Image (cartoon, rainbow, N blue to C red):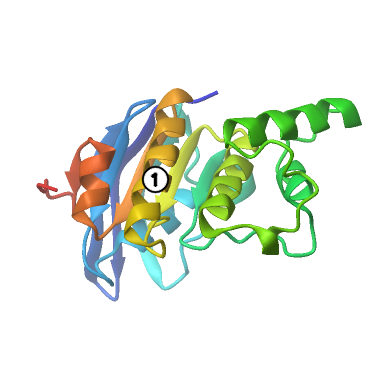
């Protein structure tokens, strides 16, 4: 279900100050990086794409996914996934139940849903972890579970909001490779927001500022 993500003359201002000016498309399997300092408009761009932009901002332009205009659609109808800085696993649910929570409702039957969870854990290198309490997982394990939960929701595109920023250097490289490999394997159009040049280089795609200026990672 992946497809091209297009930001068509997307412009966002606040109190008349330009924050975002993007006119581009991201192909399936491509990772576009938006780089900039804190407060430069990176998160504002993601909020607009998700459909969670605060009323204080003024937005013009269109957001298209697989040729469908999703600009006016609510978050839950856009089919756009988001991976945060924090893994935000539900503490009251097991690892397996965290993953099952994201499964589409049309995937019916306990056995089919359990099989989907088990496949996801195997892909994450965590077979047999379904009964585990999320509190017992390491930072890297939690990050992998969070990504698989996002992917189980079957997004058509994926936004990465500095998801590696809280990991130490060694773990950061490992989880970054894991995430980017999954994006490419599933052919998802992805946008990575970061202030880290190593993240941008690993993404191996175009790098722009929130105002659409081409950058070197």
Residue 62 left/right relative to 1: left
> Which quadrant: the N terminus?
top right
Viewer-side residue, 119 vs 100: 119
Outermost bottom residue: 15
Regarding residue 74, the answer to whether it shows in the image is: no
Residue 84 left/right relative to 173: right
Residue 215 x/y as whole percent = 11, 48
Instruction: Mark 1: give few (<14), some (14-19) or many (20+) Cα within 10 Å.
Output: few
Instruction: Examine the rendered structure and indicate whether residue 193 appears above or below residue 26.
Output: below
Viewer-side residue, 171 vs 177: 171
Residue 127 x/y as whole percent = 68, 36
Residue 124 left/right relative to 166: right
Viewer-side residue, 213 vs 69: 213
Q: Which residue is mark 1?
A: 174
Residue 152 left/right relative to 163: right
Q: Residue drawn at (47%, 68%), measured in percent from left and top?
A: 54
Q: Residue drawn at (41%, 65%), measured in percent from left and top?
A: 166
Residue 44 in which image quadrant = bottom left
Residue 145 x/y as whole percent = 61, 47
Q: Residue drawn at (90%, 32%), measured in percent from left and top?
A: 110
Residue 63 in which image quadrant = top left
Q: Secondary structure at mark 1?
A: helix
Q: Residue drawn at (32%, 36%), measured in percent from left and top?
A: 31
Residue 39 x/y as whole percent = 28, 72
Regarding residue 52, the answer to whether it shows in the image is: yes
Viewer-side residue, 79 vs 215: 215
Q: How many marks?
A: 1
């Amino acid at each position: 279900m992946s497809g091209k993500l297009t930001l068509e003359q997307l412009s966002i201002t606040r109190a008349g100050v330009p924050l975002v000016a993007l006119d581009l498309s991201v192909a399936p399997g491509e990772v576009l990086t938006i780089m900039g300092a804190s407060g430069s408009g990176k998160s504002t761009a993601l909020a607009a794409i998700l459909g969670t932009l605060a009323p204080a901002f003024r937005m013009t332009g269109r957001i298209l996914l697989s040729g469908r205009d999703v600009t006016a659609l609510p978050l839950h109808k856009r089919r756009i996934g988001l991976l945060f800085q924090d893994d935000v696993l539900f503490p009251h649910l097991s690892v397996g139940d965290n993953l099952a929570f994201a499964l589409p409702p049309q995937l019916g039957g306990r056995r089919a849903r359990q099989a989907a969870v088990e496949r996801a854990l195997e892909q994450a290198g965590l077979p047999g972890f379904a009964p585990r309490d999320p509190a017992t997982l390491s930072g890297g394990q939690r990050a992998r579970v969070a990504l698989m939960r996002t992917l189980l929701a079957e997004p058509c595109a994926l936004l990465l909001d500095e998801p590696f920023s809280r990991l130490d250097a060694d773990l950061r490289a490992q989880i970054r490779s894991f995430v980017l490999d999954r994006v490419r394997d599933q052919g998802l159009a992805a946008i990575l927001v970061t202030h880290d040049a190593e993240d941008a280089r690993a993404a191996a795609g175009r790098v722009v500022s929130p105002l659409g200026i081409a950058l070197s990672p």
